[in-house]
Image (cartoon, rainbow, N blue to C red):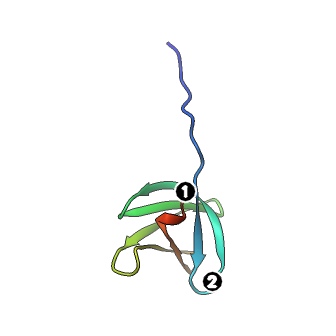
Amino acid sequence: MSMTIENTQIQTVQVTNTDSGTKVEATLDKHVPNKFMDVILANQRVRLTYNGDFGRVYVGNAYGMELTAYARDIK
């Protein structure tokens, strides 16, 4: 029995702290379009939920901050 290794590309997405306007690159863990995206920030998984009523943005909270991201910013 042989094992195969899939070629996986690490994707990132720009995440913004809405309070300060600070932007950082986070590792994209999982993305279900128009539902949610899970990102890794400071070794923690943070779920951002899709909000289609407010500019098609994904919104979440972590570390006492509101965070936002857009699917168009996935690299």
Percent across and percent down for residue 55 are: 41, 79
The quarter of the rendered structure image containing the C terminus is bottom right
Q: Please, which residue is most extreme toward the bottom here?
A: 19
Question: Could you tell me the amino acid type at mark 1?
Answer: Leu
Q: In this view, does 50 lie above or below 37?
A: below
Give the quarter of the image for residue 39: bottom right
Measuring 59% from the left and 67% from the top, which residue is drawn there?
Answer: 14
Residue 18 picture quarter = bottom right
Q: In this view, does 9 lie to the left or right of 38?
A: right
Q: Callout 2: helix, strand or loop?
A: loop
Crowding near pointer 2: few (<14 within 10 Å), some, many (20+)? few
Q: Does residue 15 appear in the picture of this structure?
A: yes
Q: Residue beneath label 1, please?
A: 28
Q: Where is residue 44 in the image (x, y as percent from the top left)?
A: 59, 61
Q: Is residue 33 left or right of residue 2?
A: left
Q: What residue type is labelled 2?
A: Gly
33 lies above or below 5: below
Q: How far apart are marks 2 and 1 (CA)?
A: 20 Å
Name the residue located 64 percent from the left edge and 59 percent from the top edge. Answer: 43
Identify which residue, 45 or 55, lies in the foreground: 55
Q: Find the residue positioned furthest to the left.
A: 53
Secondary structure, mark 1, is strand
Q: Residue furthest top?
A: 1
Query: What's the mark number on residue 21?
Result: 2
